[in-house]
Amino acid sequence: MRIAIASDHAAFDLKAELREHLIGLGHDVADLGPDTPDRVDYPDFGYKLADVIADGTAELGVALCGSGIGIAIAVNRHPALRCALVSEPYAATLAREHNNANAIAMGARLIGTDMAKACLDAFLAAQFQGGRHAARVDKLTHPTC
């Protein structure tokens, strides 16, 4: 699977750990940056991540910043993206099963590397259940209001 990963400076080290974890699992990883731990703005990298998922260059995305909140907001500005902020594996599973999330966000200052890997593994193992969830997910892309 082709997975895109992006972060800000606060999550630079976690991004490197998760990138290597994904490669070890056999995934093709697009590291969208940053390339150094120098200060950057999370929206720039969140928008990049959203674009490569929306255009089909990557199937799923991993968005990281200090809290995970800012980059999740940036990613979700794109109407084709459903990025869930997660901090434990069950939430990551439900994000895929119920919300058909195509990206997850995590906060490097709030989650350890092992827990982040567990969340990522759970996210990748889960599949959208469709059924009663499909109409709700469709409303996220095509609001009725």
Image: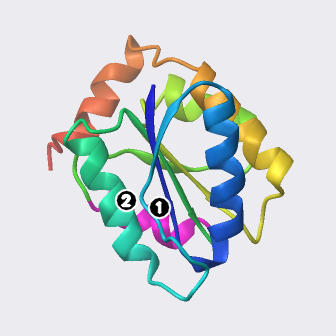
Q: Residue at x 51, y 29 (%)?
A: 96
Which region of the structure is painted magenta?
A: 68-77
Tell whether position 31 is magenta: no
Tell whether position 69 is magenta: yes
> Quick one: label 1, few (<14), some, or many (20+) residues within 10 Å?
many
Work out how far the residue at label 1 is from the one at label 2, CA to CA, in angstroms: 5 Å
In the rendered image, the residue lying farthest to the bottom is 39
Q: Residue at x 70, y 60 (%)?
A: 14
**Disc 1 vs disc 2: Cβ atoms closer than 8 Å?**
yes
Return the x and y of residue 27 as percentages of the image width and height: 54, 29
Which residue in the protein does label 1 denote? Answer: 72
Q: Residue at x 63, y 69 (%)?
A: 12
Residue 1: image quadrant is top left
Is 60 placed left or right of 120 in the picture? Answer: left
Q: Is residue 30 above or below residue 94?
A: below
Return the x and y of residue 61 as percentages of the image width and height: 45, 44
Of residues 96 and 140, which is closer to you in this image?
A: 96
